[in-house]
Each structure stands twice: as structure tokens, then as C-alpha cells.
Image (cartoon, grey):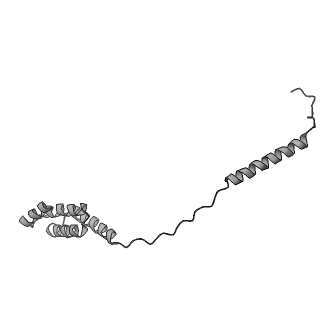
Amino acid sequence: MADYTVLIEKDPNDAEHLVKRGATYTSLQQYEKAVADYQAALKLKPDDYDTVQRLQYVQGMLQAKNAPPPPSATPTPTPGPGLITPLNVGIAIVALIIIAVILRFVTRGKAEETSSRIR
């Protein structure tokens, strides 16, 4: 950083050193200083598209840094328990056992129907 400052003091009309120092400020997240360097470089070399893009990027980062925090999000409701719970599984097993017992009593002692067909 100090090297760029010395170079800029020696040759204040060199836009390249201003751009490089602005890039260094950007990487250090010192966006206000970076904006000042990029604007000074654009005064010296207004047709430098790369510097224009860098300036726009830094201005966007500065706006994001200074933006108010987003409003607190509404909490999402927690879903209730699903259908497959231990209680429901137990009820289903008991119901199947009852149905099996009833069918066993209903069909007890009845012979299967026979047919004269060969199987």
C-alpha cells in the first residue's frame, strides 16, 4: 500500500498506480478509499472500461455493506408428526391381528370346496 502511495506521489498523472491501489483497497474491504482511487484514475483516463467496471463493483459492495439489515424472517411452522408414528403402527398391528383371528374363527371347520376338475 505504501509503495503505491509513494509511486502516486512521484507521478500523480499515472492512472495505473491509482487503479492498483484501488484494487488493494478493494481486497482489504476499504471500499471508500477504493472508490476515491478509481474515480481519480477515471479523471486521468476516462475511457478505461476496466476501471469503470471496478468502480461499479466497489460501489455495489459499498452499498451492500451500508445497507440496513433485512427484516427478520417469519419463522416457518414446524410440521406435525406424520402418519407413521409408533402409536399408529401399534394400532395397525393390533387391527390386523384382530382381523386374522376373526377370519380364523369364521373359516374354522369348513372344508374347501372340491371340484371334479383335474388341477
Q: In which quarter of the image is residue 118?
A: top right
Locate residue 66, reporting x and y percent. 32, 72
Q: Which residue is drawn at 17% across and 62% down?
A: 21
Is residue 9 left or right of 30 when viewed as pictured?
left
Nearer to us in this view, 113 or 29: 29
In the picture, measured across the screen, residue 57 lies left or right of residue 69, that is: left
Between 100 and 43, the one nearer to me in the picture: 100
Q: Which residue lies furthest to the top in this view?
A: 118
x and y percent of residue 44 in the render?
14, 68
- Residue nearest the viewer, comparing 112 with 97: 97
Q: Which residue is drawn at 28% across and 69% down?
A: 59
In the displayed structure, 114 sits above or below 31; it is above
Task: Residue 65 in the image: state x and y as whole percent.
Answer: 32, 69
How many marks do you count on the picture? Answer: 0
In front here: 108 or 7? 108
**Which quarter of the rendered picture does the N terminus lie within?**
bottom left
Q: Position of residue 84 (x, y in %)?
A: 67, 53
Q: Relative to 41, say whether 102 is above or below.
A: above
Location of the C terminus by quadrant is top right
Q: Residue 34 falls in which quadrant of the image?
A: bottom left
Q: Which quadrant of the structure image shows residue 110?
A: top right
Tell me what residue is drawn at x 77 percent, y 49 percent. 94
